[in-house]
Image: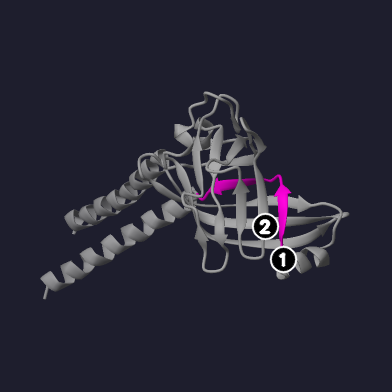
Amino acid sequence: MTTFKSRVLNAALAAVAGTFTFANSAEAAALKGDFQLVSGLTTSPFSFSLVELSKTSLTFTPQPITPIGLAHTTGSFTSFNSGNIGNIIQFSALSADNPFIDFGQLTIPGVIQPGDNTASLVDKINTFTLQSASYSIAPSGSNVSIDVALNGFFTSALGEIFKGSGNLTFQANSTTVGSVNSILNSGGSLKNMSFSGGLFATVPEPATVLGLGIVGAAMVMSSRRKIKGMTNL
């Protein structure tokens, strides 16, 4: 009896330890943390990174690279200061340029200057892939604020994947929600708007990981009991 209990206890501890080992290794390799982003700038030809919203799509300029600057980065995102953001071709039945954001480094965050190496912004390594997006329109003083909710996943250079969420915000000045909806519903668009936003990686809480370990241990104990019962038949 003592030997059986010892084996069950060891199996339970191994299940918990295995769960923590898996979680810790995934967390170490994956993109984790959060960051804020702002419109970037291309100096030659001179162009700010701007966004255009239609009823069905979100388009960024300039192309083929729309630089963004990263700020207030935490976790793995401290390795980057810039990115390249793609287009949302269609909100309904989402169609987007993926990866939606490609993270990299520039001499000045978010600014592409002549001679800058932009390879890290288009290498499809360390990215955010968009899976769903929607926007809302609300009054903001004498202006109208547009908020775009983003959901998807981050992929690190090692291929580790963590879920991610965030938003983009921009505004149309000196107008009303009714006027904006009228423009969009008639097939028009809101153009030449600067934007900002933020995203974060969804990291499992320690309590959740512990819970998984306990569940795993319980499953091991239950399995061992069933085996012992069958052996005694």
The residue at the point 30 percent across, 50 percent down is 13
From the top left corner, tell me how far across and down residue 82 is, in percent: 56, 34
Q: Residue furthest bottom?
A: 233
What residue does disc 1 label?
Answer: 184
Q: Is residue 47 left or right of residue 63?
A: right
Q: Is residue 54 left or right of residue 22?
A: right
**Exactly how many numbered labels are in the figure?**
2
Q: Tell me the distance, in whole angstroms, between the alpha carbons under discs 1 and 2.
A: 8 Å
Say whether residue 192 is magenta: yes
**Mark closer to the chain start, 1 or 2:** 2
Q: Nearer the viewer, residue 199 or 64?
A: 64
| Quarter of the image where the N terminus is located | bottom left
Marks 1 and 2 in Cβ contact (< 8 Å): yes
What residue does disc 2 label?
Answer: 53
The residue at the point 28 percent across, 49 percent down is 14
Magenta residues, start to end? 188-202
Q: Main secondary structure of the magenta part?
A: strand
Secondary structure state at the residue bearing disc 1: helix
Q: Nearer the viewer, residue 225 or 66?
A: 66
From the top left corner, tell me how far across and down residue 199 is, in percent: 58, 47
The three-letter amino acid code for the residue at tag 1 is: Leu
Give residue 219's quadrant in the image.
Answer: bottom left
The residue at the point 27 percent across, 53 percent down is 9
From the top left corner, tell me how far across and down residue 33 is, in percent: 53, 41
The three-letter amino acid code for the residue at tag 2 is: Leu
